[in-house]
Image (cartoon, rainbow, N blue to C red):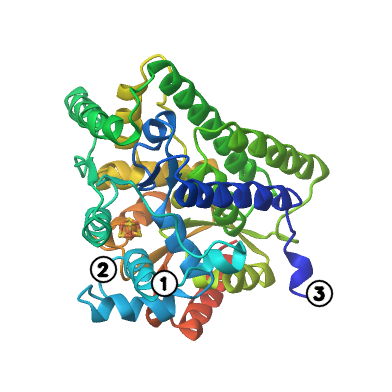
Amino acid sequence: MAEQSMRRKIRATELMNKIMSDYFYGLHEAATTGKRKVAWCTSVGPAELLRAMGFAVHFPENHGAMLGSTRMSTEFIPVANASGYSPDICSYLTADIGSWMKKITPLTKAYPGIDSVPKPDVLVYNTNQCRDVQDWFSWYSKELGVPAIGISSPKNVNEVTEGQIDDVTRQIEALIPTLEGITGNKLDMDRLRDTVALSKECSELWRKVLETAMASPSPLTFFDGTIQMGPAVCLRGTQEAIDYYKVLLAELEERIDAGVAAVEGESLRIYWEGMPVWGRLRQNSELFATLRTTVLASTYCSSWIFPSFDAKDPIRSMAKAYLELFIVRSDAYKEQYIKGMLEKYRIDGIIYHDAKTCPYNSNNRYGLPQRVEAATGIPSLVLSGDLNDLRCVSDEQTKTNIVAFVEQLQERK
Ligand code: SF4
């Protein structure tokens, strides 16, 4: 059987592409006409607040992922390296800053007429994920002369405490006067409540989408998920994202009812822990498909599920949701979380991606795989690589390791 026929395309993707296209053209219009102010936001920064205040919101990490998946990052990372940003730090950051320095963006090819990322009026970060985002936004702040403001988050959180939620709540509130100064309008709390309600609904639908992978065979792969998460990342807090996930969910449920697999002949179920290798999505997806193995659940895609959003208490619930993020948590919490996911999705093996430039999303470095394996008996494989810097990725090594791992799992079955 040909490789292509083993991986099924999702019909709804065409609609998603249209929604994402509207989003990017909307950002471009905001930035070029000045009709709306533009805010840049980190992936789990206070997007709900920005959207409720009328900002058009750009997510530089999404741009980083586009640079990775188009493999343009390979050209731009060395440009940022030459200006003093080490090859060892976040390769979203280096790819994105290098792309800005070269004045080239993958948006131009994807969306003709867009010649640049939208110029920001303000940069808003949350260090819940890593310190790199603050450094990244500080660079643009100096370059463009716009303010970089944000939240300094607690880290290594085991149980999220009321004190930590108080802290982040106060920090979100402290952003409001600066943002009001930029838009010239007061924050409308009702609008914030509505936006948080929309984010909550988007998050719930995204959870349901990902949970369709509990079915055997799974109608969805991790690789599909990394593409399908676009609206959850860039459009949470909007009706468009909700409408899209209803369509996608219906298609995946249809697949489950008909017994249709994302990977034909699924014989093994794998959990992916860590960042995707953006420049190798297709290659990895095809490799697993030929091995009749479905990588079907991941921490990464699940990170855009925020159960705590609550329209009745919008700012405090945002603070809680941003603190509950997997990347913010202690190793003890992460271990329990991963064990729960292995059981929920009936996983045969785990792949930990050790991303050279993202220690925060590489959970193989302090004995966690060994502890999880000892507790569950589920074998694991560590793949060395990177999210965007393909100089850190060995295709041969990756293939050899994956093939051997799948053989080991087959023998166990
Ligand atoms: S979490 Fe990792 S990939 Fe994401 S911005 Fe931070 S260093 Fe980069």
Q: Quadrant of the N terminus?
A: bottom right
Asked if one can make out residue 303 in the rendered structure from this viewpoint, the answer is no
Circles 2 and 3, Cβ within 8 Å, touching? The answer is no
Name the residue located 47 percent from the left edge and 26 percent from the top edge: 195
Q: Is mark 2 within 8 Å of ligand 1?
A: yes
Q: CA distance from mark 2 to mark 1?
A: 21 Å
Image location of residue 204, percent across then percent down: 54, 31
Image location of residue 370, percent across then percent down: 32, 59
Q: Which residue is mark 1?
A: 103
Task: Tell which of 9 and 190 is nearer to you.
Answer: 190
Asked if one can make out residue 226 in the rendered structure from this viewpoint, the answer is yes
Image location of residue 198, percent across then percent down: 52, 27
Indicate which disc residue 70 carries. Answer: none
Task: Tell which of 57 and 73 is nearer to you.
Answer: 57
Q: Earlier in the sequence, mark 1 or mark 3?
A: 3
Furthest-front residue in view?
33
Furthest-bottom residue in view?
396
Q: Please identify, in this view, whether the residue under mark 2 or under mark 3 is nearer the observer.
A: 2
Q: Please identify, in this view, whether the residue under mark 2 or under mark 1 is nearer the observer.
A: 1
For residue 348, what is the image quadrant?
bottom right
Residue 400 horizontal side relative to residue 293, left or right: left
Q: Earlier in the sequence, mark 2 or mark 1?
A: 2
Amino acid, disc 2? Ile
In the rendered image, the vertical position of residue 63 relative to residue 312, given as above or below? below
Amino acid, disc 3? Met
Indicate which disc residue 89 carries. Answer: 2
In the rendered image, the vertical position of residue 65 relative to residue 51, given as above or below? below
For residue 311, what is the image quadrant?
top left
Q: Which residue is mark 3?
A: 1
Amino acid, disc 1? Lys
